[in-house]
Structures are given as C-alpha cells and as structure tokens.
Amino acid sequence: MLDDMFLFVNFRKIRDRKGVNFHGVEVIQGYTVVKDGINKWCIPKFGKMRVDAVIYVNDTLKELLHEDQSLRQITNAATLPGVVKPVIGMPDIHEGFGLPIGGVMAIEEKGVISAGAVGYDINCGVRLLRTNLEAEYFNKELLYKLIERIEYYVPTGIGKKGRHKGITRLIFDDVVHNGVEAVIKAGFGKKSDLNFIEEGGKLSGADISAVSKEAQGRGEEQLGTLGGGNHFIEIQQVDSILDEKLAERFGLFKGQIAVMIHTGSRGFGHQIATDYTKILWEAAKKYGVDVPEKGLAAAPIDSKEGKAYYKAMAAAVNFAFSNRQIIMFDVIKAFEDVLKKSSESMGFQLVYDVAHNIAKWEEHGGKKLLVHRKGATRALPAGHPQNPSFYKESGHPALIPGSMGTGSYVVVGTEKAAETFYSVNHGAGRRLSRNKAKKITKEEFEKAMGDVIYNVRSFKDIVDESPLAYKDVEEVISVLSERGITTPVARLIPLAVVKGAD
DNA sequence: ATGTCC
C-alpha cells in the first residue's frame, strides 16, 4: 500500500501543475507528506531514504510538526543501513537527539544499531501499581502525608544517591546481569512481580565489561532514586473504565487508588549513552556507515562496537527495571507507614512495567528485527506469544502517562498494531521545548494543575513540566484508538504527584 | 534525560 504512494505523489504533481489542489497532500518543513488513511501520514522515500517514514497524527497534532525538526529526524533515520519500512513517528512525536522522542526504527540483522535511537535515558519506563483502596477516603491531608513519606523513602532530583546504596553496591553486578530477580532476592518485592514486568525484568545479553568504570560508579549508588525532569511518582485515581473486560483482567475499577512510577536508568544509562554515542560515531567512520547526524551515530550490529553497545544497553535496561522495583517497594512502605495497614490488606499489586526507551530483538513478519523504540511503548495484542502468561489472552497493559496535571491511560495494542511493530506512544509528548516552557507564568501553572497536590517548593524548578508544556493527552490517545491500533482500557487522574525537583 | 560544561 505504501508503495502505491509513489504513484500517488507523481499523480499529485501532475494535478498540481494543472493548478488543482489535492486534499491529502501537504508540505511540512519541506517534506511532502501524504495522507494514508485515518490519522496516518506518509513521507514516501526519496533521495538517500531507504524506506518510507510515517507519522500518526490528527489534524491538530499535525500542525505541531511545523514547529520542530522531527520530520527531518525520522527521514534521516530512514537512510540508515538495514532499516525496515517504515520509520515511525508516534502521535506524541517531538524533536530529540538523533531519533525524535516518539520514534520507532526497526533494523534487520545485517544493519546497524544506534545509541541515539534509544535515547539518553535507557529504559526510561512506567510501572503501575493497583490497590483495593477507594479514592473517596483520600483527602488532601492524607495525600500530603503520603507524598511526604514517599519523598522520605525515595530520593528525588538530579544527582541523588539511593538510600539502599549499601545493599545495591553489593548486588550491582547481579542486578545488571540478571535484572529484577536480583533485587527481589535482596528483599525488594516478591518473586511473582517478575510476571508483571516487560521481559520478566531482564533483557538478556547484558555484560558489565562493556560498561565504563565511570558509568558503573554512577550506577552503583543510584538504584532506588527517582531523578528529575519528567520523572514522577503519582498517586492516581481510576477515573473511568473504557473497556470493562480488559479492566477486570487488569484488576482496575472506577474510584480505585493506583500508583504510577515513571523513571529510568539515571546517571548509569546516561553515562552509557554518552560513552557509546562517541564510540559509535567513530565506529561509523571506521565501517563506512553514512550517518546523517551525530545523534544517529550507528555501527553494524555485528561489529565489536555495535555488540558492545547492546551489552551495555541491556545492563542499563536491567538497572532501570530494578530501579522501579526498589521504588515500588519504598512507595508501598510509605503507604504502610501512613495508613498503618499491611501491603496485603491494601491490595498492592504490580499491574505492569513497560520500557519506552529500548532496543530489542523481536520477530515481525517472520523476520528478526532490532526494534529501537525511543519514547514509544511496546503494546502486544491479545494472543501474541511474547505476552507474559497472565496477559496472554488479553494482551498486556501498555501504560501511557500524561503530564503532571492531566490524565494517564492504560491501553492494549490490537492486531492492527502490527503496522507499528506493535508500538504505541509513550506519553502526551512535549509541545514546548524546556526553554520555551520557562516562559509559563506561575498563575498559568497553578491554574493548569487545578486541585492536584504536588511536592515541589520552587516554581521555577518545575515550570517546564507544566501541563501547558505538553500536548493534550486526550488528543494524543485518540489518534491511535481512532485508527484501531489501541483499545483504551482505563483513564487515571492524578491526585498527588512527587516530582524530582530540589 | 543528565553529578544540567572537567
């Protein structure tokens, strides 16, 4: 179908010469973009592009593409060796380093691997916990107590070290090689939690010998810390159930208290990404890979440098899953302290944990592909063999957080998601760059936050995380659901949020 | 995102 686009574009040129406007073709940032059905637009390959690029947007979100360089970035990615069609931009797409945030790039075995196409925060991701607690009993006083206690247990903000650094230093090697199982053995959570984490909490192939001493030093002491920026711990209320059957399977009900944790691999992954962007940039020259911009620095998957990046990336992936596991343990402890109830009696249960910055080997259309997802979440449909056993029949929950003042969603991928390599968006997506967002006033910020409680003392530390700096999450969610790629299951709204500002 | 420029 996408191959037909060439004919279509040529046809359009002919029509244009005759002065006839053709609905469904636009020029954005110098790229000809052709409509390809509901909420899907295609940039047919041209020049050095090996494959088409596609973006999933509605008319409103499409307008935002005029404001950044994300189309240049997905078309650049489409020039890399081994890339499989199409390179994809999700509805929350915005400019990043190399590949845009909201980008999916699948590469065949003889192609290249790119650190910039995974991102600086390797295995940044989201974890959702459910409870049997009813939100109606959570007044402001209680919520303040809870976020205060959560902050007591979970260090937040840039450069913070973990409260458990004594233990984590000792198990660090085990953690990077074996993932969450290692932290569970050390007492953080229960064995069955592994059934509710993407990849069972462990991406195989990790090797600490591929990680610089500098990265190791930063990582050892940072397990169990939240970080800053868009990372958060949120006490949420299930606001609406959008699919009864799936919600029941996921243990979600209207009015329920849930907790969402959004964080990644901290300084550990950041250092690995920094190290390997440099290494892969040099390697690209050595192997003659034509890399269009430094952020897409890439080397053959098979090369020494490519293999080393995968080993180091997997180490950071395992670190981040484990980081969220320890934070979950500490959050539950905070609830136990404040509510004076046991975790069991509050019904705490991990719903799922998804990565949204990762490269993984997967099978698509009978081919083994290295799927780079950067600000994109895997969403396997019902019946897909890669689902964890508990969610085999339903498809696993894909978690999509909104901004700090707005709703978050639980969705499931459908069979139609095969066209995105079973990927969906990862959030609302930035609308304003951090610099532009600094211009938001305190009044505007507070109005946008409404009744949501938050921990931050200094407005200027958090202003760039304002809901106003993000796209409308409802709009973003509707793009893929209207196309039939996702089934929305539940909408959650924030009651109180812990952010990582000092 | 990030010991936000060794």
Image (tube, rainbow, N blue to C red):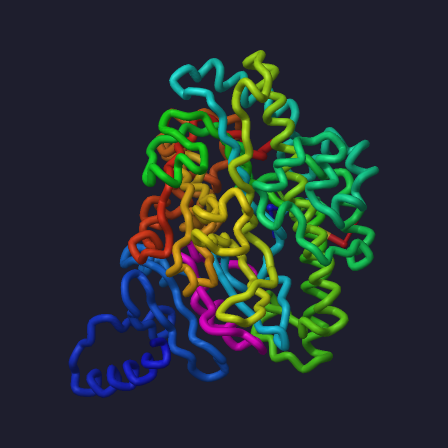
Q: Residue at point 69% right, 51% down?
A: A316
Specify start and end residues of the magenta stretch as a single range.
Answer: A70-97
| Front residue of this view, candidates A208 and A463 | A208
Specify whether residue A446 is painted magenta. Answer: no
Is any atom of residue A55 visible in this view? yes
Quarter holding residue A171 = top right
Quarter of the image that includes the N terminus of chain A: bottom left
Residue A129, x across and y down, in percent: 52, 32
Quarter of the image that includes the C terminus of chain A: top right
Q: Residue at point 75% right, 35% down?
A: A185
Is any atom of residue A406 visible in this view? no
Quarter holding residue A339 = top right
A18 in relation to A213, above or below: below
Instruction: Give the tally of numbered discs.
Output: 0
A243 in relation to A363, above or below: above
Residue A2, x across and y down, in percent: 36, 76
A228 in relation to A119, above or below: above
Residue A20 placement, left or right of A186: left
| Front residue of this view, candidates A308 and A281 | A308
Residue A263, x across and y down, in percent: 59, 41
Residue A57 placement, left or right of A287: left
A71 in relation to A476, above or below: below
Q: Residue at point 61% right, 36% down?
A: A193
Specify whether residue A71 is painted magenta. Answer: yes
| Front residue of this view, candidates A299 and A73 | A299
